[in-house]
Amino acid sequence: MNRRIVLWRHGRTEWNVGGRVQGQSDIPLDEVGHEQAASAAARLATLKPSRIVSSDLVRAHDTAKTLADLVGLEVELEPRFREMNFGVREGLTVREAWAQFPEVMRTWGRIPEARIPRGETYAETGDRFATGMRRLVSTMEMSETVVVVSHGAALRTCICTFLGI
């Protein structure tokens, strides 16, 4: 068997429900998020993971811990697997962000190098996460299955960076 990495996004939070950008704000799972984590963990346990590596943000860590408790593993924390830093946009809805930062919002979605003040670019997030992934891969045994628990934007960006897309 070859090495296998399973990428898993954390469960739902109150900010997800409200359409607020979480970024690196440390927002916990809500009740539904805990249920989602338990449901997915039951399925992921059948893959018999040998390691679980998670972002150090509480919503990802708690999601990972649900699986870890099921399969008898410890969660390894990896800060490079944190969500993208959305800077001044964190905590805001899209409407609020457009009202407060119209110029930033105009360029941010269209120009890959655009940066929200005090935040990261997509390229920086992808590089940070892909560096963590390369380190993880270099420590894996050939028959190992590792579950990585992280965040939506960081996972999408890392996949593209890691695969050279």
Image (cartoon, grey):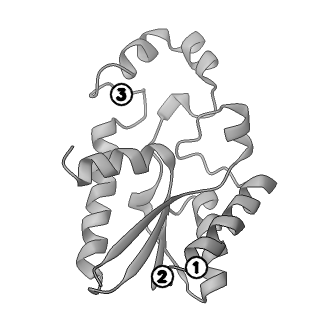
The numbered disc on residue 115 is: 3
| Amino acid type indicated by mark 2 | Pro
Above/below status of 137 relative to 27: below
Residue 93: x percent and y percent?
A: 64, 25
Helix, strand or loop status at disc 1 = helix
Q: CA gap, disc 3 to disc 2?
A: 37 Å
| Amino acid type indicated by mark 3 | Arg
Instruction: Compare marks 3 and 2 and give the one earlier in the sequence.
Output: 2
Quadrant occupied by the C terminus: top left
Q: Is residue 162 visible?
A: yes
The residue lying at 63 percent from left, 65 percent from top is 40
Query: Which residue is denoted by mark 1 in the rendering?
Result: 45
Residue 50: x percent and y percent?
A: 45, 86
Residue 88 or residue 39, whichever sits in front = 39
Query: Which residue is denoted by mark 2 in the rendering?
Result: 49
Q: CA gap, disc 1 to disc 2?
A: 7 Å
In the rendered image, the residue lying farthest to the right is 31
Residue 101 or residue 32, whichever sits in front = 32
Sort mark 3 into few (<14), some (14-19) or many (20+) by Cα contacts within 10 Å: many
| Amino acid type indicated by mark 1 | Ala
Helix, strand or loop status at disc 3 = loop
Residue 135: x percent and y percent?
A: 26, 71
Mark whose residue sits in front, 3 or 2: 2
* Count of all numbered marks drawn on residues in the image: 3
